[in-house]
Image (spheres, rainbow, N blue to C red):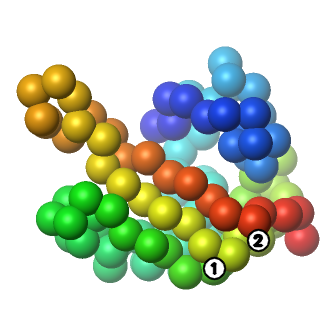
Amino acid sequence: VFTFANQAGLDMLETTLVALQDISLEKILDENGRKRLCSDFTQIMQQGYAYLPSGICISSMGRPVSYDRAIAWKVLNDEDVIHCIAFMFLNWSFV
């Protein structure tokens, strides 16, 4: 479940901050993106972050969005327990 995005993230996903929680990662990433994230999940948990190669994701309106690179990192709470995984998509554009 997505819980926060800056304006660029909301624009890329074509959604609002209120509707953001209705979007799941499975709906955004295409099959290749999901496979890459699963293969890098261990690295994210052990190292704290991972660089994901370029790819295509899908906005909430169903439009394809290409990106040059993505970065995923784990976010810890005050007790050093994993709170969530954050994503940053670089150089994205609608295809």
- Kindly identify which residue carries mark 1: 54
Q: Residues within 10 Å of mark 2 (few under 14, many from 20)?
A: some
Q: Secondary structure at mark 2?
A: strand
> Quick check: marks 2 and 1 in contact, CB under 8 Å?
yes
Q: Looking at the image, is mark 2 or mark 1 earlier in the sequence?
A: 1
Please indicate, yes or no, whether residue 31 appears anywhere in the rendered image. no
| Image height of 45 relative to 54, above or below | above
In this view, which residue lies farthest toward the top? Answer: 18
- Kindly identify which residue carries mark 2: 66
In this view, which residue lies farthest toward the right? Answer: 95
For the residue marked with disc 2, what is the amino acid?
Ser
Residue 16, image x, y percentages? 75, 26
Front-most of 90 and 22?
90
**Residue 77 placement: quadrant:** top left
Residue 26, image x, y percentages? 52, 56
**Residue 66 placement: quadrant:** bottom right
Please indicate, yes or no, whether residue 37 appears anywhere in the rendered image. yes
| Image height of 78 relative to 80, above or below | above
Residue 20, image x, y percentages? 63, 30
For the residue marked with disc 1, what is the amino acid?
Ser
What residue is drawn where x is 69% and y is 75%? 68
Q: Secondary structure at mark 1?
A: loop
Distance between the alpha carbons at the discs numbered 2 and 1: 7 Å
What residue is drawn where x is 24% and y is 71%? 43
Q: Residues within 10 Å of mark 1 (few under 14, many from 20)?
A: some
Q: How many marks?
A: 2
Front-most of 31 and 81?
81
Front-most of 26 and 94?
94
Q: Which mark is residue 7?
A: none
Residue 18, image x, y percentages? 67, 18
